[in-house]
Amino acid sequence: MPYVNAKEMLADAKRNHYAVGHFNLNNMESVRAFLLAAEEQRSPIILGVSGGTAKYMGGYKTIADMVRDFMDFLKITVPVCTHVDHGTYEEAMAAIDGGFSSVMFDGSKYPIEENIAKTREVVRRAHEKGITVEAEVGAIGGEEDGRIAMGECADPEQCERIASLGIDFLAAGIGNIHGKYPANWPGLRFDVLEAIQKKTGDLPLVLHGGSGIPDEMVRQAITLGVSKVNVNTECQIAFTEATRAFIEAGKDREGRGFTPRALLAPGLEATKAKCIEKMTLFGSIGKA
Ligand SMILES: [Zn+2]
């Protein structure tokens, strides 16, 4: 069964200058949508799960089991990875025990020494089970209102220290932002990305906040060493807009449109279409 960690898929992406999409699960419809998109497009895929989604969908074990059972049911043949998104130390450990194939431990809010100590422990526990680990380095301190328009940037020296712990891939701020980007956002800091890559060698880098970065910048980031791009907001909006259109057109009041499956079907299709659009941008189509 092609339920795998992220090691091989990201190494291949790095070698061949494309990126694997990390798409966040939000509900059962998103599991179906992303698996079907990946299979149809012959693309590897990473399914991300935030702490909130883990609670909503019944915990890490329920989700890992659900993904694997769906893969069986849908006869998925492309590599699929389940991954914790911005996990706390406890969440990362729970996912390791729950059958996830990959975890992110986000220690970026801790002082660097504490981030290093906790990341080291997550790596030890995860690697015992063949689970890959993404770590995150915190921001360089900057003035407050500079940060409103500009996302945070990581310190390349700290990236090098975290990279040396044996992590499998690294998230480091290069001016990217989670959620919607302000109109006056100055863009990604490719100079910071290059400086980080110089310090971290072949380690695949991760671009968070992939929703709303102009396509050209995403392509350039991939050229410079980003091998995984996280997308959540855009898929959520696609789902909700399609659901809204269904209701506004009165289709929930026609025939059996009131059934939850009928109501959520357009959202599922829209999520799948958005996922394929992103896979196209990342260059992962046909790579599995
Ligand atoms: Zn993120």
Image: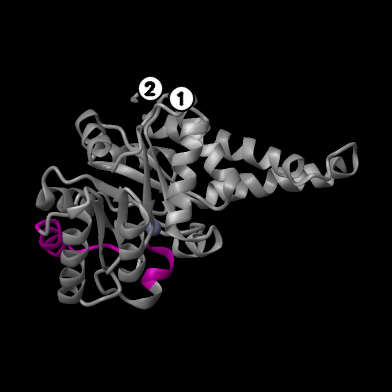
Q: Point out the residue furthest to the right here.
A: 254
Q: Which residue is mark 2?
A: 286
Task: Compare marks 1 and 2 and give the one earlier in the sequence.
Answer: 1
Number of other residues with Cα within 10 Å of mark 2, as a class: few under 14, some 14 to 19, many 20 or more:
some
Do residues under tags 1 and 2 come within 8 Å of each other at their CB atoms?
A: yes
Q: Quadrant of residue 133?
A: bottom left
Residue 172 spot, x, y in % from top left: 26, 57
- 267 relative to 47 in the view: left or right: right
Which quarter of the image is occupied by the N terminus? Answer: top left
Q: How many marks?
A: 2
Residue lying at 75% horizontally and 48% vertically, measured from the top left? 244
Amino acid on which the number 1 mark rests in the picture: Gln
Q: Which residue is mark 1?
A: 41
Which residues are drawn in magenta?
146-164
Find residue 149 and name its label. none
| In the depicted structure, whether residue 84 falls above or below residue 271 | below
One can see residue 277 in this view: no
Quarter of the displayed picture in which ligand 1 can be seen: bottom left
Residue lying at 81% horizontally and 46% vertically, measured from the top left? 247
Q: Quadrant of residue 257?
A: top right
Residue 241 spot, x, y in % from top left: 69, 46
| In the depicted structure, whether residue 47 falls above or below residue 164 | above
Amino acid on which the number 2 mark rests in the picture: Gly
Secondary structure beneath dot 1 equals helix
